[in-house]
Image (cartoon, rainbow, N blue to C red):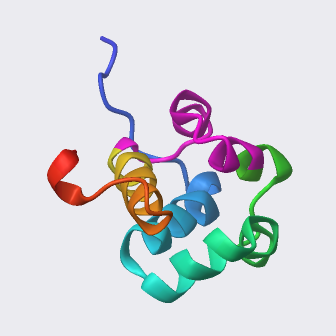
């Protein structure tokens, strides 16, 4: 039987930790907005993970083990941080 939801693998810990911080930590989010390469390097993300995050490629992030909720919330908070929209519009 195929599972609809798969738990993130341990190998995706750094990616999910980065997404969690983007969602929850204003200082880290500001750092990422100012310097995405430096912030993702400091988190230990692989080049492919950092590229998927930079391009907001949801499918690529989930394929690499990112939790779908964290992908959604990180993208939402980044959009808001960049002045793209307020929470009322999501």
With respect to residue 17, does 46 lie above or below? above
**Which residue is the extreme one toward the bottom?**
27
Question: Quadrant of residue 87 in the image?
Answer: bottom left
With respect to residue 79, does 67 lie above or below? above
Q: Say whether residue 29 is left or right of residue 1.
A: right
Question: Quadrant of residue 81 in the image?
Answer: bottom left
Q: Say whether residue 68 is left or right of residue 50.
A: left
The answer to whether residue 36 is magenta is no
Q: Say which residue appears at 69% left-offset and 75% top-offset.
A: 34
Q: Say which residue appears at 33% left-offset and 54% top-offset.
A: 85
The answer to whether residue 62 is magenta is yes
* Quadrant placement of the N terminus: top left
Q: Say which residue appears at 56% left-offset and 80% top-offset.
A: 30
**Which residue is the extreme one toward the left?**
88
The front one of 12 and 45 is: 45
* Quadrant placement of the C terminus: top left
**Residue 70 on image: x %, y %:** 39, 54
Q: Say whether residue 71 is left or right of residue 54.
A: left
Q: Which residues are magenta?
A: 51-68
The front one of 36 and 5 is: 36
**Residue 8 on image: x %, y %:** 47, 47
**Residue 48 on image: x %, y %:** 79, 43
**Residue 60 on image: x %, y %:** 62, 32
Main secondary-structure element of the magenta-colored stretch:
helix
Q: Give the total of numbered labels.
A: 0
Q: Say which residue appears at 81% left-offset and 74% top-offset.
A: 38
């Amino acid at each position: 039987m195929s599972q609809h939801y798969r738990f993130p693998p341990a190998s995706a810990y750094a990616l999910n930790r980065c997404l969690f911080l983007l969602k929850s930590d204003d200082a880290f989010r500001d750092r990422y907005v100012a310097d995405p390469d430096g912030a993702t390097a400091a988190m230990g993300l692989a080049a492919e993970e950092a590229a998927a995050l930079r391009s907001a490629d949801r499918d690529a992030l989930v394929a690499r083990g990112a939790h779908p909720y964290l992908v959604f919330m990180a993208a939402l908070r980044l959009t808001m941080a960049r002045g793209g929209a307020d929470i009322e519009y999501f």
